[in-house]
Amino acid sequence: MTSITVVVPAYNAAGVLGKCLQHLAEQDYPKDRYEVVVVDDGSTDATPEVVAEARRRLELELRYVRQANAGRAAARNAGARAARCPVLLFLDADVWAAPQLLSAHARHYVGDQRVGVQGPSFTHPDSRSNPFMEVKEMFPDLTPRRARDLSPYHVITRNFSVRAEDLWGVGGFDESFTGYGWEDIELGLRLRRHGVRLHWEPSAVTWHYHVEDLEAACRKQTEAGRGAVYFWRKYGCPFGLGMFLELHPVVRPLKWLVYRSGLLTPGVRVLLRCAERALQSAGGKSRKLWLAVASECYNHLLWHAYYEGVWSALRRRG
């Protein structure tokens, strides 16, 4: 039976990490066939105390690694280096695993087939505590996912496994991704190019419990915009990747007009304020309508933040 190291990067995650570890202790997988490595990425909260308490309370092979704050890519690499098992499963500290998570990943690692396995991560219902969170997954993602030939553009490493030898065979995560976004998809591209087949496993379910508001999400999207420029340039600015990242020169004039010119965004902000006020008392069909309006406004403002990061990164190279 496959042995698995679960790598959990954590940064100021004291409020959610305990529940993450509790769910990992409740897996239907044999206790002697998996371990958990928590990598503390320079936290300033009670994250170390949460890990210590979990060690005392849970029946779980749990180890703790601490590093200076360097980002999730570096933290995942640190966890992978500390791993004792041949298969690595990457989660996040605010991700809660269904009991069958490890079993679902493990059944793909039979024989010597080189694979990486992606499972779904759904927004936890209890995290829908404000209008911004309420519209999460309001419109379903209908992008097809091939079970035995998953696109690397679907790799999300808050629920992704791969053999350690394959991870290090492509050099691990690129630690130049220090902000939010893209380090997982970029890893997926390198794995795919080096002959690792990516699998989609819908029964490897996790729940993402992360409550945020528009302001916090916009900060992350600005980081993602900067990271996207680095990602694109790393691969030589190819057309396909530039279109996927929506920053190729072909689309930039339109993106600038919509998101950076100031023609639309002020009106979107006014409309959003109207929608959020209406949601304070709306119910039934009226509430669904106003949520749809709010969702479109949030989406515009998130893209506005993304292109703030894109343009700032492009300017740095003239």
Image (tube, rainbow, N blue to C red):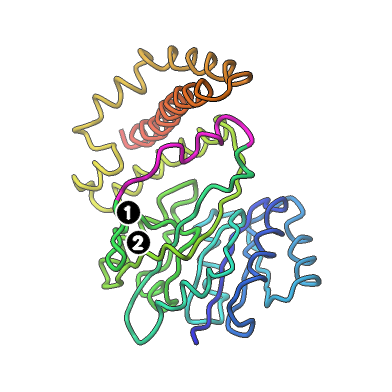
| Residue 184 place in picture, x, y as percent | 41, 57
The answer to whether residue 219 is magenta is: no
Residue in the picture at 26% in, 53% down: 235
The residue stretch that appears in magenta: 129-143
Residue 229 vs 15, above or below: the answer is above
How many marks the image carries: the answer is 2
Mark 2 or mark 1: whose residue is earlier in sequence: 1
Query: Is residue 133 on the magenta stretch?
Result: yes
Q: Relative to residue 266, is residue 48 drawn left or right? A: right
SS of the residue at dot 1?
A: helix
Instruction: Identify the element where label 2 is drawn.
Output: helix
Image spot of residue 299 (x, y percent): 42, 30
Residue linked to disc 1: 153
| In the foreground, 205 or 83 | 205
Q: CA distance from mark 2 to mark 1?
A: 7 Å
Magenta stretch, main secondary structure, is loop
| Viewport quadrant of the C terminus | top left
> On the image, numbered disc 2 is attached to which residue?
188
Give the image location of residue 167, x and y in percent: 41, 72
Amino acid at pointer 1 = Tyr
Splitting the image into 4 quarters, where does residue 225 fall?
Answer: top left
* In the displayed structure image, the side of residue 215 where residue 264 appears, left or right: left
Judge from the rendering whether residue 46 lies leftward or rightward of residue 126; answer left or right.
right
Residue under the image location 44 percent in, 54 percent down: 176
Vertical order, 263 against 11 (above or below): above
The reply to whether discs 2 and 1 touch (Cβ–Cβ < 8 Å) is yes
Residue 153 vs 299, above or below: the answer is: below
Residue at x-position 50% and y-position 69%: 89
Crowding near the residue tagged with mark 2, few <14, some 14–19, many ≥20 C-alpha atoms within 10 Å? many
